Image: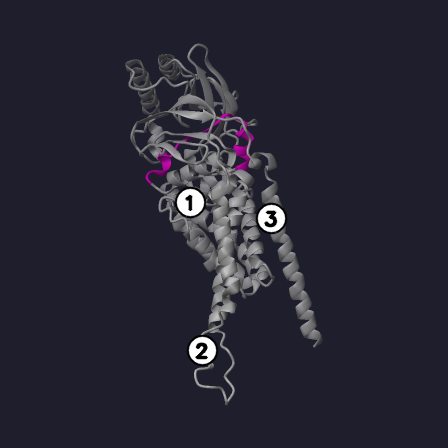
Amino acid sequence: MWPAFPPLDLTPLAPVGVALLTLALRGRAPRTGAWLGFVAGAGFFLPVLEGISAVGPDGWIVLSLVQAAYFLPLGAGIALVTRLRGWPVWTAALWVGEELLRGHVPFGGFPWARLAFSQTATPLTPYASYGGAPLVTFLTALVGGLLAYAALTARTAYTARRPAPAPDATDGEDGPDARPSWRGFVPAAGALAAVAALAGGGTLIPTPTSGRPVTVAVVQGNVPRLGLDYLGQRQAVLNNHVRVTHELAAKVRAGSLPRPELVVWPENASDLDPYSDPGAYNAIDGAVRDIGVPVLVGALTDTPDGRKVENRGIVWDPRTGPGDYYVKRHPVPFGEYLPFRDVLTKLITRFNQIPRDFAKGDRSGVMRLGPVNVGDVICFEVAYDKEVRDVARGELLVVQTNNATYGRTSLPPQQIAMSRLRAVEHGRTILVAATSGISAIVAPDGRMIDRSREFVPDLQVAAVPARTSRTLSDRVGAAPEWVLTALGLGAICAAAAASRATARKNEEN
């Protein structure tokens, strides 16, 4: 499955991988299925999360194996429900349940590398506007289950033979080694027809892109060096974003670029607190006044008591300065805050690089930025359904991120893929601003309007549609995820009950 994800983007391999895992688990005892699931999970998460190795190989391996542990119940469940009729549907529902659990537990979960995030430019992508990422995961897994069913039934039909002819049969009649009856291939053909219908249905789903045009600009200032220690040059990072914004203003005055109505800076554009550092305040304020339109500034600020840090997106007005702001609601455990701090800092000295925990915001990031309301999420929050859904009432969505820590790994392109799916899910233009790349402007239908290279300064200016209409996915919210999870759990209960009944009958006999 992992090559289906960026940067390889071999998207058909996601359902093929699901099919292979299903075939490996079918007919196994649940306990055996659990361990096979764990092995499959390790084989998937270790390569797909290799970007975490930039933080440390130990963190990468531990996180990958923890994620693989969620495949223990998935493997056991698939082994069990494949005993039921209609098992491609039940196995697909179990994938949704696995992702729900993995995306919530523990510490708020880690919903990276969901099946849906491999399907951001396929015929299944438009279904996101109906049921969000959970529905796309379900359909991806359902295609995999149908492929497995087609393979099994075709194999059964191929190995079947007509009975031997009677002794007085005329020459030329079929014998025991004759070709199988084509009627045996009907179930396989039906499964493949269902796959084609799902793909075809996706292409018929409308993905409207019309809306009030708004000219936007995304600034990527770049960082002095990649890796964890880039934070040691905070002033340089801020200066880079200030400089590129002044360059934008100069190009607007020269007429080489259209004047934007709003500008977006990335997360960590200023790790110097502009509220307490006059130099940082003046540098940001000067750049914003030069461009003359509101700028969404990513900055780290102290909490009033000074004990924690806030990861903010600040609306900076060219006349009135800093105003409304959003505080990241889902800081990353072991990255932005440290559970069990007293114990872990003694065992792993690298955690001393997190001297203070990040505070958790308590409200959604819908704010007025120039002529529109924008919905802001910061970095990994784009992977969480609820955080993005909460800000989808904004006319544009913004993802402020800092990918410098992860270097040239698979994580930045995977994050862009998530933004593309979210654009379709909510019918919104998405502006992705990254300190070092990948920055992008994504149309409401998931198309890439612009995309930066990594570790270079970059400016993106485009007229994009600002939209207010809501998708069906916005209206139904989390319901599809919970309904599909309940469907999978119900199938497990039914399969377990049937297995017990069969065991009792065998004992009686």
Task: Left or right? Give the position of 353 relative to 504.
Answer: left
Count the marks: 3
Residue type, label 2: Ala
Label 2 and label 3: CA atoms lie apart by: 45 Å
Q: Are marks 2 and 3 in contact (CB under 8 Å)?
A: no
Can you give x and y, in whole percent of width and height, for residue 43 in the image? 42, 55
Task: Please state the extent of the stretch shown in magenta in the rendering.
Answer: 385-408
Residue type, label 1: Gly
Query: Which of disc 3 and disc 1 is earlier in sequence?
Result: 1
- Mark 1 or 3: the one toward you: 3
Is residue 495 depicted above or below 458 in this figure? below
For label 1, the SS is helix
Query: Which residue in the protein does label 2 denote?
Result: 178
Query: Which residue in the protein does label 3 denote?
Result: 485
Q: Is residue 386 magenta?
A: yes
The quarter of the rendered structure image containing the C terminus is bottom right
Q: Which residue shows up at 51% across the image and 42% down it?
A: 127
Q: Residue 422, labelled with which disc?
A: none
Q: Residue 280: which quarter of the image?
A: top left
Q: Are marks 1 and 2 in contact (CB under 8 Å)?
A: no
Report the residue that reaches farthest toward the bottom: 167
For label 3, the SS is helix
Q: Residue 59, labelled with which disc?
A: 1
Query: Which of disc 2 and disc 1 is earlier in sequence?
Result: 1
Label 1 and label 3: CA atoms lie apart by: 30 Å
Can you give x and y, in whole percent of width and height, for residue 45 in the image? 43, 50
- Mark 2 or 3: the one toward you: 2
Q: Nearer the viewer, residue 173 or 308?
A: 173
Residue type, label 3: Thr
> Dot 3: within a 10 Å radius of its alpha carbon, few (fewer than 14), some, or many (20 or more) residues?
many
Can you give x and y, in whole percent of width and height, for residue 244 in the image? 31, 21
